[in-house]
Image (cartoon, rainbow, N blue to C red):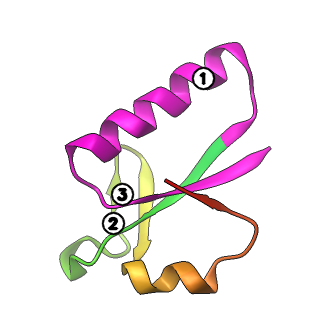
Amino acid sequence: MKKVVILGTGGTSIDILDTIADINDNYVGLKCVGFLDDNKKLWGKEVQGVKVLGPLKKASDLDDVYFI
């Protein structure tokens, strides 16, 4: 299973999350483990059931994930 973190929480990010779900309908292999977004009001909250992990600069702290 490949772990994915989506950068940003805007409309395109939701489309990406939907695409990951569609891919997993046919091939289980991706898991979105969170979003990164610089909007402090979103940190720790969920967007479409996926947690906002913190700001974009936190990407350097995350290991073994792919970023979209």
User: Image quarter for residue 45?
Assistant: bottom left
Q: Where is residue 48 shown, x and y percent of the image?
A: 35, 43
Q: What amino acid is at disc 3? A: Glu
- The extreme top residue here reads 26
Q: Where is residue 43 shown, x and y percent of the image?
A: 33, 76
Highlighted magenta segment, given as a residue range = 1-30
Q: Where is residue 2 shown, x and y percent of the image?
A: 75, 48
Q: Where is residue 64 shown, x and y percent of the image?
A: 76, 67
- Graded by Cα atoms within 10 Å as few (under 14), some (14 to 19) or many (20 or more), the crowding at tag 1 reads few
Q: Is residue 18 magenta?
A: yes
Q: CA distance from mark 3 to mark 2?
A: 4 Å
Residue where numbered disc 3 is placed: 46
- The extreme right residue here reads 1
Residue where numbered disc 1 is placed: 23
Q: Please state if 66 lies on the left or on the right of 11 as rendered.
A: right
Q: Secondary structure at mark 2?
A: loop
Residue at horizontal 38%, vertical 73%?
44
Q: Secondary structure at mark 3?
A: strand
Q: Secondary structure at mark 1?
A: helix
Q: Please state if 6 lies on the left or on the right of 43 as rendered.
A: right
Residue at horizontal 64%, vertical 44%?
31
> Are the residues at dot 3 and dot 2 in contact (C-beta closer than 8 Å)?
yes
As drawn, 38 above or below 6: below
Q: CA distance from mark 1 to mark 2?
A: 25 Å
Residue where numbered disc 2 is placed: 45
